[in-house]
Amino acid sequence: MIRFFTAGESHGPGLVIIVEGIPAGLTLDEDYIEVQLGRRQKGYGRGGRMLIEQDHATIISGVRHGRTLGSPIGMTMENKDWVNWQQSMSITEVENKPDYDPEDARSQRVTRIRPGHADLPGAIKYGFDDVRNVLERASARETAARVAAGAVAIRLLEEFGITMHSHVISIGGVSAEIPESIDWQAVEESPVRCADPEAAARMMTEIDSAKEAGDTVGGTVEVIAENVPIGLGSHVHWDRKIDGLVAQALMSINAVKFVSVGPGSEVVEWRGSQVHDVIEPVTDLDHPWQRKTNRLGGTEGGMTNGMPLVARFGIKPIATMVNPLPSVDLDTGERVQAHFERSDVCQVPPAGVIGESMMALVLANAFAEKFGGDSVEEMRRNYQGYLKTTGPRKLYR
């Protein structure tokens, strides 16, 4: 099983990442992981935190001489902003609580609840009288750790020709025209990770407008995994269906409110003859079971079907706003303006990179489950043997 764990608070000393189940012999280094972390930090509408942090994951276990050992991979990531929060986020007890430094706003208890954030349910669930105990872990800062873990999964998938991409479909009321063939390099260079340059310009205007109003804006992202083999996931149990696992992974990203595999809600308006992807006659045993369309997003019956795995997800506008919503105080229940914590205006562009990481982690686990192996070479032998059996039943090679 390939799985990962993260630990750490937004303004604490740093983040900790453990990735378990990666086979031995995979080439991996910190520079490769840093590329993915750098992609997450880009994007029009990001806040001041991105000017402070230059994320770098330090590998402390599971890799020797540039190759994985098969043991858990441990990584740490420094929060450079910690220098400004050492008293407020001190691990040890501080004196004169609850407001132990009247001159430092960071040390004041947070009681003004933000609608749309984890503040209220988290404080009630865990019995806190200071919302900072919730918001520090609920912060999207944790997604940096996910991207570090996801980079390891992406590196493993690359060994088997599987590649990950993402692009922004909409921001606010601005939607992109999706080209038939996407120029992924152009997407990487776009400030909003959009394949439609004209729509990208309007998206940036939408973000500017929200920022000027002290507001925030959300949008929709598409994640695509290409060269995925047939048969990852399973139809035999609800918790092994690949589309369900992908949906759970993407829904777990901060502020995501809907997920679809393929185009999503559009297909409910079409008839079956317009939805299902016709299978073409097999003329190439190296590439059997081809289809001209991919309306189902690369899954059937909870399994990948050999077409690109495509999922979309929607990010709601960020709950922390410069112009806060009316709310109530956790102590008194009286009307107040919601707390403001430094934040982005729009998290949609970097969400695609996070989505790639989460989908890659799901696929890497499903790949390991299907093809096993304690080393990359053993996994490769198993995979190549499987591919020889995937053609028409009477034409096994």
Image (cartoon, rainbow, N blue to C red):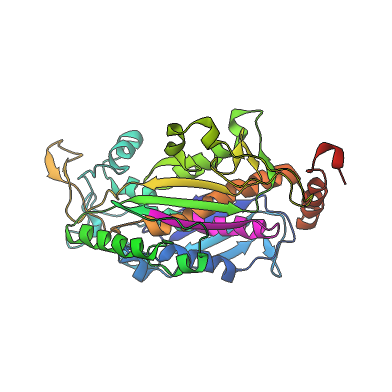
> Which residue appears farthest toward the left when viewing the image?
335
Going 65% across and 53% down the picture, which residue do you hit? 227
The magenta stretch spans residue 327:
no
Out of 211 and 285, give the one closest to the viewer: 285
Residue 97 place in picture, x, y as percent: 24, 50
Q: Nearer the viewer, residue 314 or 277?
A: 277
Residue 51's spot in the image, x, y percent?
35, 71
User: Is residue 105 shown to the viewer in this render?
Assistant: no
**Identity of the residue drawn at 29% across and 49% down:** 317
Whether residue 164 is visible to the viewer of this picture, yes or no, is yes
Q: Is residue 53 above or below residue 163?
A: below
* Quarter occupied by the N terminus: top right
In this rendered view, identify the residue nearer to me: 16 or 166.
166
Residue 107, x across and y down, in percent:
24, 56
Residue 43 image point, x, y percent? 38, 64
Q: Is residue 73 above or below residue 32?
A: above
> In which quadrant of the rendered view does residue 59 lie?
bottom right
Q: Which residues are magenta?
A: 145-169
Q: Is residue 162 magenta?
A: yes
| Above/below status of 229 relative to 57 | above
Classify residue 119 as left or right of residue 13: left
Report whether 200 appears left or right of 382.
left
Q: Residue at x 30, y 59 (%)?
A: 344
**Which residue occupies the foreground of this view, 224 or 333?**
224
Count of numbered labels shown in the rendering: 0
